Image: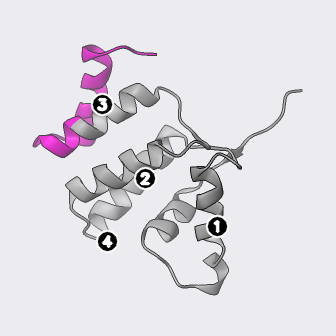
Amino acid sequence: MGQMIALLDTNVIIRFLMGDKNVKYKDLRGFFESLENGKRHCELKLIVLFQVIFVLKSFYKVQKTDIAEVILNLLDYKGIIVKKKINIRSAMKLWRDNKMEIVDCYLISFLAGDSQ
């Protein structure tokens, strides 16, 4: 059996992005710094990514341009593994720049671009 990779959870990402001061989450900054520089690796599943977008937009009322930018930034972290990263990046930019739903932008990214 191959090496297992940790999965990023919606709550962890939301707590990090919203700067949660809860003691339970005090080590998140260091954790995400280790993901950013590639010292630690985690996979970000698409369903979690969409949950993060939904929670930020609906519960926290974050503007979609800000959400898209923060997701694009996370995609640059060396230790965050995302399947179809090229398509996800394309979908985020399309969503940020247009009045369309994120799922439509995601589907268009596969029609318009390389599906690597």
- Judging by the rendered image, the residue that carries numbered circle 3 is 90
Q: Is residue 25 above or below residue 110?
A: below
- Local SS, label 3: helix
Quadrant of the snapshot with the N terminus? top right
- How are the residues colored? one colour
- Judging by the rendered image, the residue that carries numbered circle 4 is 60
Alpha-carbon distance for marks 2 and 4?
13 Å
| Within-10-Å neighbours for mark 2: few <14, some 14–19, many 20+ | some
Q: Amino acid at mark 2?
A: Gln
Expressed as whole percent of the image width and height from the top left, the position of residue 115 reads 41, 15
> Farthest front residue?
37
The residue nearer to you, when weighing 80 against 91, is: 80
Of the two numbered discs 3 and 4 on the same chain, state the one appearing first in sequence: 4
**Closer to the camera: disc 4 or disc 1?**
1
Name the residue located 71 percent from the left edge and 49 percent from the top edge: 39
- Local SS, label 1: helix
Q: Amino acid at mark 3?
A: Ser
Mark number for residue 2? none
Quarter of the view holding residue 11:
bottom right
**Closer to the camera: disc 1 or disc 2?**
1
Q: Amino acid at mark 4?
A: Tyr
**Residues drawn in magenta:** 94-116
* 83 relative to 79 in the view: left or right: left
Mark number for residue 30? 1
